[in-house]
Every structure is written in structure tokens, then in C-alpha cells.
Image: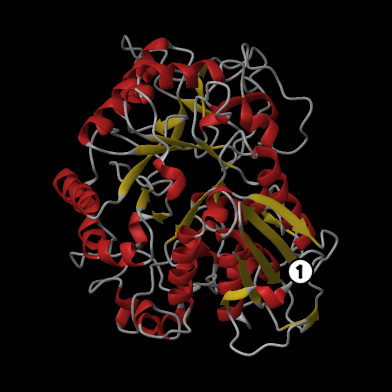
Amino acid sequence: MDKKQWYKDMVFYQIWPRSFKDGNGDGMGDLLGVYEKLDYIKSLGCDGIWFSPLYPSPGVDCGYDISDYMDIAEEFGGMEAFKKVLDGAHERNMKVIMDLVVNHTSTEHEWFKKSRERIEPYTDYYIWRPAKPNGKLPNNWDSLFEGKAWAWDEVRQEYYMHLFAVQQADLNMDNPLVREEVKKILRYWLDMGVDGFREDVVTFISKPEGLPDDRIMPASKGINMYNHGPHLHEYLEEFNNDVFSKYDCMTLAEAPMVSPKVALKYIDETNNPVLDMMIQFSTQEADCFFSDFRHMPFSLRKYKKALSKWQNGLEGKGWNMLYIENHDHPRIVSRYGSEKFRVESAKMLAVAYLFLKGTPFVYQGQEIGMTNWYPSDPSLYEDVQTRWQYENVATNKPPQKRLERLWYGSRDSARTPVQWDDSNNAGFTTGTPWFFVNDNYKEINVASQQNDDNSVLNFYRKAIKLRKELSCVRNGNYVEYNKNSSKLYIYSREYKNQKVLVVCSFSGKNEHWKVPNGFDLNNSELILGNYSNSELNVLKPYETRVYLWK
């Protein structure tokens, strides 16, 4: 069938189910809570939902360790609740995409249990290797979460690969039976009415033959070997030809360490694309080195360079996925903005990405300017990666410094419950929440912003409405100005007779700026801004403006 590109006109809202809204009072976010908030999501201007995993799972990696791909976890309400939400979303003309996690499964999955027992046909569903004669591991690859990438299984008496948590065993995608299982999963959900998938670390699914040692990357050994492996395009093409091409759906692939040039191998619309969009990480690395835990001062130049590289690199060929927050990174206001100027910087950060070319995603709580969580004790963290970091990295540093690494880098900062109001537990639950609520919920919550015209929440609504109304944002070219500035991000979007100039200050002080050549503000309209009174050539702390010519 001819694939439609409805996703290009949409704004998606990402739900991390555990922390969105608890509808039955047991302390865990669930689909009943989601159903209650469908109209709220729609009111933002969002017309699509991406669900992080809802499947049954032991919860070692908060749902990304899946034990059954064809069911919905009871803790979230089960299949009946999911179908109710799916129907409710579709009744509101909203699309629903799910997380597809097929690089690995939980070690509690039936496939793994049978594979460790060498029960056919599951024997080779996973990547098993014997110990080397000298007792060493099969190779020198590292896990991205917990130590080395190999764990010993007493039942099978072999090592299995786990690129993430020990309880997340990597599937052997070279086995055609495994690929057929993936296709069954895809058809199951698409036939139910799901509109597409966000594919978790899908660029990792093809490992090199022989699994050789990585002698190039001194840190995170292995990623250089298995990222964009030898059969990746072949397998993605197989999934596309056999399944996706037969449905009106969209595919979004998570792709660590990817460049626009490499991305176009998969998403080039002029050359038989096998995917629709890719989630790149480079725009999330302006205050760190590859990992959020390797914290550095925020660099606007680095951020702008990444944004422009993707805007220019995909122009006319591929489509960008736009985001500033998700479940895998700390809160953006605390990273790229300012908690001192929280409201101003939250609005500015919204503008900086919402007027770029691509499909924006808004992560739960982002729209009210939620901030990082700063626990007093490392034992309060839930995330498996965070706990391993504290126990095994930078152990020579004082405990407080090690704790601060977690403040800057932990994914748990973005996983505290959504702050709905100033009642107990921020209105997230009437029970005991599964995880800690940020202490600032009385100040930062949806209810307090709902009827405030100057709130972050209503600013998001205005910004999303504007981007949908402006054809130059959907179709226009992109030009960046003041490239060498470490304080200002200024760009234009132009299409036919319509043009916008987007001005963003990343400074906590007043900053002078000059209107770029060719722009006469006397003939423009200021259609969006986060200050009511401003001098023309002076930007206040974290000020943003959007000018329109037509």
C-alpha cells in the first residue's frame, strides 16, 4: 500500500506509564489514569501518543525487560484497559504508537527459559557462547548498564550476551525464527489498531560474525562493533517489506551514535526507506560526553551545531524527529535552561525546538516545566543504570560528589510522577506512589497552570497551535544566524511568502542582539514571546521571540 505520512503534521506526547497517572489508587500509573487524561493531552495540541512499554515485565529496567510481547501488564490495567485507551484516542483523532523492544527480552521470557534448557526451536533464540579455554569471557564487550556484556547461566553452562541489564538477554536476530517472531508481534498490535512503533535501540540488533573483540573504543567496548551491524539494513528491510509496508503505520527508530549521513541509509525518502524517522542522541549531548553521567558545562554552540546538522543534513531527503526530553535523560530545564529562571527557560526551550522542521515529541511533565529530582541518598534511586553507576564508577570520589553525578545524569530525574495538583502526592495517586514525588510539586503542577495565561503549560499550547498553523514550519527551509554566539540561537524558516524568525537567549543575563540582514521588523508581527515588555535589541534572561512575515 502507499504509505501515508500523517506523522509529519502531528505532535506526539510520550507517556512513561508508571509515572503518568494512577487511576485505581494502588500507587502505580496505569491506563485508567491515561484514559482520564486523554482530553488533557488533546488540549495541548498533541494528536499522537507514544507509550513506553506496557507489556508484562519483572520491572528490572522499568518495563524494557519484557516477558510477554502480546499482552498488557495487569499493573497497567491489562488488555481491556489498553483497548479502551486505544479506542478513546482514535475517537479523538489521536494516533497511538507503542514501544518495540526486540534487541533483548527479559530472562523471565518463555523463550529464554526454553533456550537455556536447549529446547527446540528456542535453543538459538539468544546469543550464547561457551567460556574461552582460559576461563575468560567470550569477548571484551561492555554492557551499557552493568559491567561486562556477558552473564553466566548455570542451567545452560554458557554465557549469554546482555548489552543492557543482566536480566535483559540479547536476542539472536540472525536466527530467521526470531525475525518471524518479531513479525508476529508487529502484526498482532497493528491488527489491533496500533498506529506504529518506536523501536528501542534497533540499530543494535545485528552483531558482527564471530563477535570479535573491540580494539577501537576504549570506553563502552563493543558499541563500535554492534551498532549498525552487518545485517541491520537487511533485517529492517525485511520487517518493512513483510509487515510495515502493508499497514498505514509509522516507524521511529532509536539510534545512538548516528549521524544524518548514516540515518539516511534507513530514512531517505528518495531511496526506498525502511524506516520513517530516527531518534538521534547528539542534541542531548550538549552538557555531557556520550553519557549523561559524564557531565560537562552546557555548550550552546555544541547544541546549535547538532540541531543545524540534522536540519540541514536531512533537508529534502529525510524527516526529523524533534525532542528535548524523554524517559532516558534528566529534565531539560535543569540541564539546558535554568531552575532560577524556570518559567522563562522552559518556554524558551520549547520554542527552540518546536519551530524546527520535523515531528515534535513532548514528554510528560515537560509541558509544565518539571525539573530534576535531588534525593539526599543514592539508595532512593530506582533505575538499574543509576545504581550501577554509583556503586562502580568514580568510587574514589567523596560520597557527595558521587551523589551529584546522579543528580546530573540519572534517568530517574525524568521519572518522578507527573505533578497534577498541589494535593497529596501531587494528585498522581490516592495511594502510596511507587516512586518519589518531586518536592516542588506544590509550586509546579498542572492545576496551578491550567487557567494562567502566562504559564508554561499554556505557552506550550500556544506554541504548538502556531507551529501547526504555519506552513513555513512544516515545509520551509532552515537558516541559522549568529552561529558563533555562545548565548543566542537564532534561525529562520521560510516557505513561499511566509517566513518566521526564531530568537532564543540561553543566557541568565540581558543580551544585546542585532536583527539579521534582510529582516525588517517593522513589517513583521511578534506572534510569540515569553516577556510582555522588552526592548527591541535587548533580550532578557532566557527570552524568546517568534516574528512572522507574510
Q: Is residue 364 left or right of residue 352?
A: left
Q: Quadrant of the N terminus?
A: top left
Residue 115 image offset from top left, x and y in percent: 36, 18
Q: Is residue 387 visible?
A: no
Nearest to the observer: residue 285 or residue 239: 239
Residue 69's place in the image compared with 96, above or below, is: above
Q: How many marks?
A: 1
Q: Is residue 37 left or right of residue 154?
A: left
Residue 331's place in the image compared with 544, above or below, is: above
Residue 477 image offset from top left, x and y in percent: 66, 49
- Label 1: few (<14), some (14–19) or many (≥20) C-alpha neighbours in 10 Å: many
Residue furthest left as drawn: 80
Residue 20 image offset from top left, x and y in percent: 34, 62
Q: Residue at x 58, y 17 (%)?
A: 131
Q: Residue at x 50, y 73 (%)?
A: 369
Specify the color scheme.
secondary structure
Secondary structure under tag 1 reads strand
Nearest to the observer: residue 82 or residue 147: 82
Residue 316 image offset from top left, x and y in percent: 62, 36
What residue would you read off at disc 1?
488
Nearest to the observer: residue 296 or residue 365: 365
